[in-house]
Image: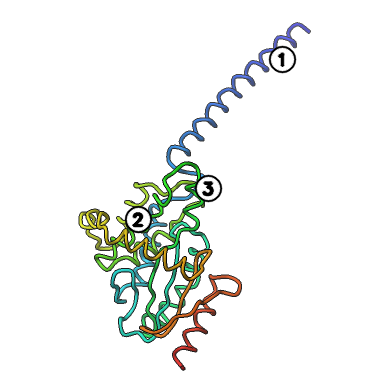
Amino acid sequence: MEEAAAASAARRTRLTQLGIVVGVVVVAIVVVLIATGGGSKGGLQHGNEKNATVSAISSLLDGIPQSGNTLGSPTAPVTLKYFGDLECPICKEFTVGALPTIIPKYVRTGKLRIEYHSMSTATGNAEKEGAEPGGIFNTQQIAAYAAGKQNKAWYFIETFYHEQGEEDSGYVTESFIQGIAKQVPGLNLVQWSNDRNDSELANEVETDKQIANNEGFTGTPSFLIGRSGGATSKLTYPNSPGEPAFVEEAVEKLLKS
């Protein structure tokens, strides 16, 4: 009985020690995840995943004219104005789900041009706890417009949406923005960094937000569509913005008018 009791005590000691070791390992893993932005927050892609994203975006956009925030031919008969927030998950749904159909069918063929405009929705929610209003929103949107100075804004926009993290998680940092820029093919990073300080780009973001407010938009994505150079009207999506039909129907109607 004494031997059995001693053996039992030894087992309890070993289990306690094992539990301590496991606890230390778990804590270490959590610390690493927090430090590296891991877990479900999302963030920059790496390796094969990043290469696949860059390849897919290049295949979608290469050869299509870009100017500033505009994708498509300047002579396209129809213009779609897309108001978005780079951190908006519903905007991601539209960009990743619908645009891969819309761009080859209408933009690449010269029938449609798409203008990207800024409207703060999802990012504003992440800034409620003491951050300067509009701070990170303006920073990320201006970074996209700065790429537009080299006619590469849409590469930046598409890459950001493809690598978008968890809403309200604070994943958008200067390091994240720099990482997105580094994935834009042929982007001169020195020029891009300098262009981010251009006051005209900050004014452009503010003008976009005022236009969205005047139109009564309350969420993103929001859309205006019309004949290029003419009047525009609001375009709403019936169910999911990831389905391209609502844009296709509006474009076809305008092309026939």
Q: Are marks 2 and 3 in contact (CB under 8 Å)?
A: no
Instruction: Note whether 236 is above or below 213 in the view shown.
Output: below
Cα–Cα span, label 2 and label 3: 19 Å
Q: x and y percent of residue 106 in the render?
A: 41, 82
- Given residues 3 and 222, the one toward you in this image is 222
In the displayed image of the protein, which residue is found farthest to the bottom? Answer: 256
Q: Which element is circle 1 on? A: helix
- Given residues 9 and 3, the one toward you in this image is 9
Q: For the residue carrying disc 2, how many other residues have a C-alpha within 10 Å: few (<14), some (14-19), or many (20+)?
A: many
Three-letter amino acid code at the position of disc 3: Ser
Three-letter amino acid code at the position of disc 1: Ser
In the displayed image of the protein, which residue is found farthest to the front? Answer: 214
User: In what quadrant of the picture does the N terminus appear?
Assistant: top right
Q: x and y percent of residue 76 in the render?
A: 35, 84
Q: Would you name the residue on which mark 1 appears?
A: 8
Q: Earlier in the sequence, mark 1 or mark 2?
A: 1
Residue drawn at (74%, 10%), measured in percent from left and top? 5
Q: Are marks 3 and 1 in contact (CB under 8 Å)?
A: no
Three-letter amino acid code at the position of disc 2: Ile
Q: Quadrant of residue 108?
A: bottom left
Choose mark 3 or mark 1, whichever is in front.
3
- Given residues 22 and 85, the one toward you in this image is 85
Cα–Cα span, label 3 and label 1: 42 Å
Could you tell whether 233 is left or right of 238 in the image?
left
Q: Would you name the residue on which mark 2 appears?
A: 180
Q: Earlier in the sequence, mark 2 or mark 3?
A: 3
Instruction: Note whether 112 is above or below 256 in the view shown.
Output: above
Q: Earlier in the sequence, mark 3 or mark 1?
A: 1
Residue drawn at (40%, 80%), measured in percent from left and top? 79
Q: Would you name the residue on which mark 3 appears?
A: 40
Q: Quadrant of residue 190?
A: bottom left
Q: x and y percent of residue 101 in the render?
A: 46, 77
